[in-house]
Structure formats: C-alpha cells, structure tokens
Amino acid sequence: MKNKIVIIGMPGSGKTTIGKKLGKELSLKFFDMDEYIQESTGKTILQLFENGEDYFRDIETETCKNLMKYENVLISTGGGVIKRERNIDILKEECLIIFLDRSVDRILSDVDVSQRPLLKDGKEKVIRLYEERYELYKKYADEIVVNDSDVDEIIARFKNIINDTKKVKIL
C-alpha cells in the first residue's frame, strides 16, 4: 500500500496551488519539487537550466529519490518529470500518481511565462509542450483530475479519488 501522492502535469496546471491546499487538508507534508530543488542547490530553476536541460533532469532524478525517504507526503513535481522514465519508476514504486490535466488556454491565462524556462517562448511553445507531454502524463498516471473548475472543486475531486482508490493509505 502506497502512502505518498504525486501530482504531475503541465507547468501552470495548478499542481502547486492544489497540492499545498490538499496537503494541508489531508495533514500531509507537502513538497513542491521545483522549490525543493532550488532550496537544495541554492539556484533557481532558470539558473540550473543554463547548464542544460540534461543537467537539470539529473538533479530532478536525484530529487525523486530523496523525496521517497519521507512518509505521508504529497509531492508536486516539475512539469517535465515524465521526460525520464527512471523518474516515473522511482515514483510509481511508492506513490499514487495523479495527472492534473488543464487546457492550454487555461494555462496561458494564469501563468507568468517569464518565470518558466520551458514556457518563455510563448503560446506556441506551450502548445508544443502540451502535445509532446500529454500522452506521457496519461500513460504514467494512476488517476486523472481535470482542472476546469475552482480550487475547492478540484480538491474535492482529488479527495474522492484518494478515498475511493485502494492504492493509497494515508496514515
């Protein structure tokens, strides 16, 4: 039985916003993977990407491993965590993985792309990323929640999945 929950999805899909509130409501320790990486390296995601995407992805893989030492946690991943199958292997072993699916239009209406290295090239880049990653998110997710409503409704959908599934046990 798994006792960790992971939220995957596009940058700007609401992973951190939903994760923080859901973690609090379920009394789970919440980790935002990008924030964890920034705190542990002392560098911003943008600075880490200056060394190349592979460099950043290596750090991300190590972070996946490091976060598995915690019990009863909710983890919001970076949007590209699914680009390395090794990351998913690490997470699948101990976590219920939920894909937070949000339309490109909703993402673009909410996100400050200047702070997102892979989105800084604008709408076309967001669309390309969505097309490139969407099937991977679906493939690796145990469950899918569509983010098409207000935060409280999305939280309720997560809680229903967590309560209904036999894959996760929160202590």
Image (spheres, rainbow, N blue to C red):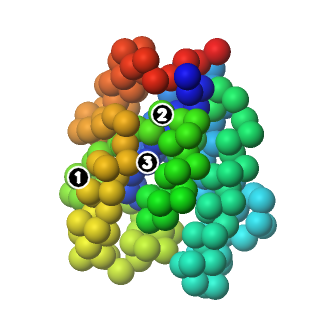
Give the mark nearer the N terminus: 2 vs 1.
2
In screen coordinates, is 118 left or right of 57? left
Marks 3/2 in contact by CB < 8 Å: the verdict is no
Q: CA distance from mark 3 to mark 2?
A: 11 Å
Question: Mark 2 and 1 residues: CB-CB less than 8 Å, in contact?
Answer: no
Mark carried by residue 103: 1
Q: Is residue 17 visible?
A: no
Image coordinates of residue 100 in percent, x first then y, are: 35, 43
Q: Quadrant of residue 51?
A: bottom right
In the image, residue 66 sits, relative to residue 95, either above or below, namely: below
Q: Badge 2, how many Cα within 10 Å: few under 14, some, many 20+? A: many
Q: Secondary structure at mark 2?
A: strand
Tell me how far mark 2 sits from mark 1, CA to CA.
22 Å
Local packing at callout 1 (Cα closer than 10 Å; few below 14, some 14-19, many 20+) is some
Residue that label 3 marks: 8
Foreground disc of the pair 1, 3: 3
Q: Position of residue 52 (x, y in %)?
A: 58, 84
Q: Amino acid at mark 2?
A: Leu
Closer mark to the observer between disc 2 and disc 1: 2
**Which residue position is annotated with label 2?**
96
Taking the spot 23% from the left edge, 52% from the top edge, the residue there is 103
The three-letter code of the residue at mark 1 reads Ser
Which kind of residue does numbered mark 3 sit on?
Ile
Please say if 7 is above or below 163.
below
Q: For this view, does 157 lie left or right of residue 124? A: right
Element class at badge 1? loop
Position of residue 111 relative to residue 18, above or below, is: below
Dot placed on the residue nearer the N-terminal end, 3 or 2:
3
